[in-house]
């Protein structure tokens, strides 16, 4: 039985819900706790394993099969949970719109600034470009889908 991730059917939904839960229950937040965060992490791992198993059973192959990538994703989300910026998950990439005041933090967890897109991006592992054409964020969103998991707000600004 899932307490925190009930009704989750895809890894994208799982990751979005994970980010939302961390914003609420992270130990650095008022009302957050280490115990609840550990419960959330354990349940996330269980649900991720089930979703990965289901995708293999269905013969689907996707970017979320790699457990190392999943761990890296969780680590990055844990580091950026408090930044005051728009955060969007597109495919297996995390895009941060704004967040200039947090640039050192973003760089430290592996984000790169994409000057043509005017935002920060993170992707697990090395990225090899497969074409010469510049692709806009809107084109990427149309191809992979997009989930906005955080909007700028004063509540989550860094002190």
Image (cartoon, rainbow, N blue to C red):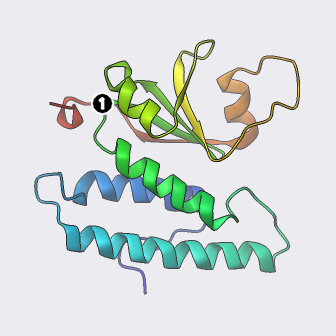
User: Residue at the location (73% across, 27% down)?
Assistant: 139
| Residue 144 figure quarter | top right
Q: Return the residue found at the far top.
A: 116
Indicate the position of residue 154 as horizontal and vertical percent values.
20, 29
Closest to the observer, 113 or 104: 104
Closest to the observer, 63 or 88: 63
- In this figure, which residue is indicated by the disc labeled 1? 84
Indicate the position of residue 63 as horizontal and vertical percent values.
72, 56
User: What is the quadrant of the C terminus in the image?
Assistant: top left
Left or right: where 51 falls relative to 120: right
Q: Residues within 10 Å of mark 1 (few under 14, many from 20)?
A: many
User: Residue at the location (58% across, 55% down)?
Assistant: 12
Indicate the position of residue 7 as horizontal and vertical percent values.
50, 72
Q: Is residue 65 above or below residue 53?
A: above
Indicate the position of residue 82 as horizontal and vertical percent values.
28, 41
Left or right: where 127 falls relative to 121: right
Q: Return the residue found at the far bottom.
A: 1
| Residue 1 figure quarter | bottom left
User: Residue at the location (74% across, 72% down)?
Assistant: 55
Q: Is residue 76 above or below residue 103?
A: below
Q: Return the residue found at the far left.
A: 30
User: Residue at the location (42% across, 76% down)?
Assistant: 43
Left or right: where 15 falls relative to 38: right
Left or right: where 92 falls relative to 30: right
């Amino acid at each position: 039985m899932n307490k925190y991730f009930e009704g989750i059917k895809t890894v994208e939904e799982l990751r979005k819900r994970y980010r939302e839960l961390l914003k609420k229950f992270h130990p650095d937040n008022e009302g957050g706790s280490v115990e609840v965060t550990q419960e959330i992490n354990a349940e996330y791992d269980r649900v991720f394993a089930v979703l990965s198993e289901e995708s293999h059973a269905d013969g689907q192959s996707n970017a979320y099969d790699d457990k190392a990538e999943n761990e890296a994703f969780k680590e990055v989300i844990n580091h950026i949970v408090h930044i005051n910026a728009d955060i969007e998950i597109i495919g297996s990439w995390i895009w941060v719109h704004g967040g200039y005041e947090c640039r050192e933090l973003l760089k430290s967890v592996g984000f790169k600034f994409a000057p043509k897109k005017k935002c920060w991006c993170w992707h697990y592992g090395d990225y090899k470009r497969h074409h010469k054409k510049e692709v806009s964020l809107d084109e990427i969103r149309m191809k992979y889908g997009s989930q906005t998991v955080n909007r700028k707000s004063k509540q989550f600004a860094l002190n």
